[in-house]
Amino acid sequence: MTVEYHKIIDRPIVTEESQILRENGNHYVFRVSSSANKRQIREAIEEMYRKEEIKVVSVNTMNYSGKTRRPLGTRRSGRRAHWKKAIVTLRPGDVIELI
């Protein structure tokens, strides 16, 4: 079965925290599909960076619930989307060029 990684991996998350994780522990942070499990995320990352021969050691996931927001000037309230974050650990020596 081929992994359709573009449906699983949404985008990399580049923040101060993710930069520190990348420099200190070879961890990379991605926003992923809410329905994806750790195995699918691992396969998608390895398929996505197949040319660099990336090997994923572990995957940690976190689910975030959407926050309630009210646009200025209205009495209506809405909700932001729920989303999932994955922290992917690579074997020592492997590097992903994000930018």
Image: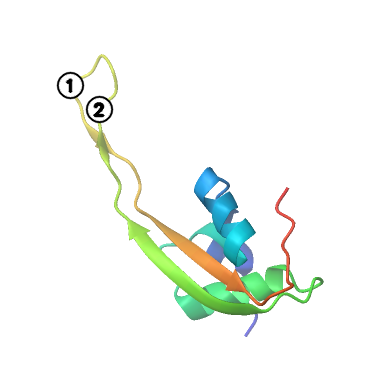
**Quadrant in the picture for the N terminus:** bottom right
Question: Which mark, by number, is residue 60?
Answer: none
Amino acid at the residue labelled 2: Arg
Q: Which residue is more in the foreground, 93 or 49?
A: 93
Q: Is mark 2 on a helix, strand or loop?
A: loop
Quarter-wise, where is residue 88 in the image? bottom right
Count neighbours of disc 2 (C-alpha within 10 A) and say few if under 14, some if 14 to 19, many if 20 or more.
few
Residue 22: x and y, percent? 61, 58
Which residue in the structure is indicated by mark 1?
A: 75
Mark 1 and mark 2: span between their CA atoms? 7 Å
When asked about the image quadrant of residue 4, the answer is: bottom right
Residue 35 shown left or right of residue 14 in the figure: left
Residue found 58% across the figure and 47% down from its top:
14
Judging by the rendered image, the residue that carries numbered circle 2 is 70
Could you tell which of marks 1 and 2 lies nearer the N-terminus? 2
63 left or right, relative to 50:
left
Whether tag 1 and tag 2 are in contact, CB under 8 A, the answer is: yes
Across and down, in percent, residue 29 comes to 54, 58
